[in-house]
Amino acid sequence: MGFGLDDAVLARYAPGMSTQLQITRPDDWHLHLRDGAMMQGILPETTRHFGRAIIMPNLVPPVVTGADARAYRDRILAARPEGCDFAPLMTLYLTEDTDPKDVRAAHTSGLVTAAKLYPAGATTNSASGVRDFDKIQPVLETMAEIGMPMCVHGEVTDSDIDIFDREAVFIDQVLDPLRQRVPDLKVVMEHITTKDGADYARSAPGKLAATITTHHLIINRNHILVGGIKPHYYCLPVAKREEHRLALVKAATSGNPAYFLGTDSAPHTDALKENACGCAGVFSATNTMACLAAVFEKEDALPQLEGFASLNGPSFYGLPPNSDKITLTKGDVVTFPEKIETGDGPVTVFDPGFPIHWHISQ
Ligand code: NCD
Ligand code: ZN
């Protein structure tokens, strides 16, 4: 399949040739760690390269209160590999009943970094999300007052809106009006997939930003559907047409601080993906940094990788960057495991569809 890396670029990967790049240790500003045996199996895939991650709260049941977040954070800390100081940055799942006082206490104590807004029914485990956005006005005002960012899954859920249009419609019909009602709220548009999302995200520096996933920089909707349905490329928001992928690549490699990495690495077992009603989610924790290096190199934008993966996120969230570094070295083709075995079953690793030549070391 035409996966983007052309012969001229591949020719630059002459065997034995090596280019090295040292960058501040990256963070993942949108990550699903799940719980229990699944978390135990996949957590090392993230902690190997990433210093911190914004942990999505869409467990069953969701992480709604400060007490839920504390208990989940403690389970994550206990599941970390020996000697690893990976820091989970916790989020609360906003519901129509979320108590602003609990949110304030959880954020001001440092327990919770952000709150996540899921329109009800938009994605995996979002049934307890928000239907009536007016109902969360008080909690959003509290968040604006204390400088707590809102991460948002930006898709409408109306059955009469085409799935490929749901992000653009959400910006017009929900997000922009909501931001006008709470102008001081800091908003992260999670996993943008369209040119519309990329354009809107840079329209209010310091107040608005967007995460971009690794897989949305690499696949478009043809990769899901042409030549047979590929369940491991199915995620939400669903990948769009090529012109949108190109807009995302341009945004991610531009150096604009409004864009940073959120892998949205979202493990589901093969049994649940390869199914008549397959779950949405791409698992990319294992090879994300190596894939990103390939994407940025293709754009001649390797110098921008550190901003995207390691600096712009902390800057938006008001946190210092990590103090240590990782090294990316270009060399022979790297082989990644096809699957990660977990106590719940195997999880397929994202296949970028072209050879990866980037080795990551500490
Ligand atoms: C995520 C999941 O599996 O939890 N799935 C996905 O396709 N991205 C949920 C989400 O972030 O939308
Ligand atoms: Zn997600």
Image (cartoon, rainbow, N blue to C red):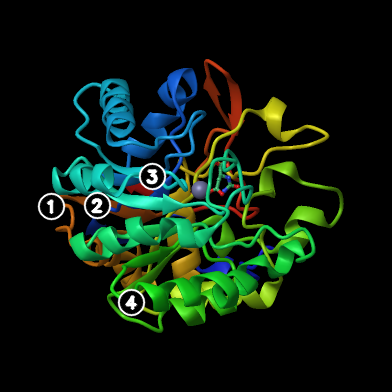
Q: Amino acid at mark 4?
A: Pro
Query: Residue 98 — which label?
Result: 3
- Alpha-carbon span between mark 4 and mark 1: 33 Å
Which callout, 4 or 3, points to the residue nearer the camera?
3
* Disc nearer the start of the sequence (4/3): 3
**Side of 345 relative to 30 (left or right):** right
Q: Quadrant of residue 337?
A: top right
* Disc nearer the start of the sequence (2/1): 2
- Alpha-carbon span between mark 2 and mark 1: 7 Å
Please tell me whether mark 2 sits on a helix, a strand or a loop.
Answer: loop
Q: Amino acid at mark 2?
A: Arg
Work out whether 183 lies above or below 56: below
* Disc nearer the start of the sequence (4/1): 4
* Disc nearer the start of the sequence (2/3): 2
* Disc nearer the start of the sequence (4/2): 2
Work out whether 51 lies above or below 253: above
Which callout, 4 or 2, points to the residue nearer the camera?
4
Which callout, 1 or 3, points to the residue nearer the camera?
3
Please tell me whether mark 4 sits on a helix, a strand or a loop.
Answer: loop
Marks 2 and 1: CB-CB under 8 Å? yes
Marks 2 and 3: CB-CB under 8 Å? no
Q: Residues within 10 Å of mark 1 (few under 14, many from 20)?
A: few
Can residue 164 be seen by looking at this rendering? yes
- Alpha-carbon span between mark 2 and mark 3: 34 Å
Residue placed under numbered mark 4 in the picture: 183
Q: Amino acid at mark 1?
A: Ser
Marks 4 and 3: CB-CB under 8 Å? no
